Image: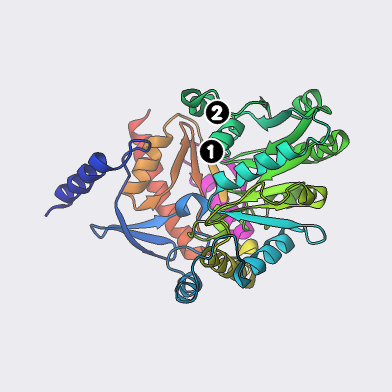
Amino acid sequence: MSDMDDLNEWQGRFDRRIMRSIGMPLAKLDHGRGARVWDDAGHEYLDFLAGIAVNSLGHAHPVFVEAVTTQAARLAHVSNYFTTEPALELAERIIRLAGAAEHGRAWFGNSGAEANEAAFKLARLNNSGGARTRVLALVDGFHGRTMGSLALTGKPHMREAFEPLPGGVEHIPATIEALERSLDDAVAALFVEPIQGEAGVVELPDGFLAAARELTHRHGALLIVDEIQTGAGRTGEWFAFQHDGITPDAITVAKGIGGGFPIGGLVTFGRASSLYSKGQHGSTFGGNPLATAVSNAVLGEIERAGLVENAALRGCQIRDRVEGLGNRLVAGTRGRGLLIGIALTEPVATAVAAASMRAGLIVNAANDSTIRMAPPLIIGDAEIDEFADRFGRALDAVAATHH
């Protein structure tokens, strides 16, 4: 069977049987190792997307494989009528890494959307007098696709087909002026991403998080920071809010904390840790021993191997290499650490991503004019050299056809 016959075969199966809520996949992947994956036809790709900031240790890392294998042979699921040592250890670990040690608490679910649902309910509980009816989130923010997390998401094209969504959410521009106009004593919570990944790796304005912390504190609102894409060391700190030296009331986590195993969570600080009471939230699979054991292993390896520091170093190297390519399609770069947006001078991001695939490189068109990259935290000089060669060829190919 030729590559084209094989392509048509799996695409046909996908089209007949997979729900059409997602588009046709770019390839049918078979296996991976480190920062590389191979499709079922044997083509190799350098993976600079890492499952959208998920595969922190790359693919088939020995620490990940050992954690899955060992815990699966011991105990995989117990429900939330019980606890296990991996769950307790992970709660203690992630609270420590977030700097919430004194009064911090953690809740675990299965995804980022679930984590934001838990945070949305936390916001509703910050309403002891009944007057806090408003929840603020940012224009262009993305918090998930469940009904509650979609209500928080500031992208009308994602929301419109599912309205009416849970009420009380207002979307404001990511400016300090908008914060000052919008925050009052009727606000229960403000949700922010420190870097808006789905919007094209867009950073908040300088001083925004500090102003958000001061204003929410003044008005008794919760500051809830969505660290789902930015956490687990990706930006060169354990969590991106730590770059700004503030302490939020809660953060949501997922993606990179599991290194490829599904897990999400909510971490609370200070008074927010006392808002939930028995029976107000739960998840059958949340905090199961298999997921929490793997997350412990992943976060432990990130810490042991200095991968937070590596993310900071390699991110600077990649941005320098991209800007040094001298291609007219590159307008500049954005982001921190290994969450990088490449701004393009023309709306050709989809073509650049496709040309990159043909060159053996996986990146993502976050929007028409931005390429997003979130490579594994393990990458080094060799992978960056190879990336620069492949991405440079992809840019040259697109530039030659767009005058």
Q: Looking at the picture, tell me which residue is in the foreground, 158 or 175.
A: 158
Q: Secondary structure at mark 1?
A: loop
Q: Amino acid at mark 1?
A: Glu
Residue at 61% x, 56% y is 108
Q: Quadrant of the C terminus?
A: top left
Residue at 48% x, 46% y is 325
* Residue 328 is covered by the magenta coloring: yes
Name the residue beneath numbered marker 1: 198
Occupied quadrant, residue 350: top left
Task: Give the spatial CA distance, label 2 vs label 1.
Answer: 10 Å
Q: Is mark 2 in CB contact (under 8 Å) with mark 1?
A: yes
* Residue 99 is covered by the magenta coloring: no
Q: Which mark is residue 146?
A: none
Residue at 11% x, 55% y is 1
Whether residue 11 is situated above or below residue 309 in the rendered picture:
above
Q: Which mark is residue 155?
A: 2
Residue 290, percent from left and from top: 51, 67
Q: Residue furthest left?
A: 1
Give the class, few, some or many, for how many residues have Cα within 10 Å of label 2's Cα (few <14, many ≥20): some
Residue 229, percent from left and from top: 58, 48
Q: How many numbered dots are placed on residues in this image?
A: 2
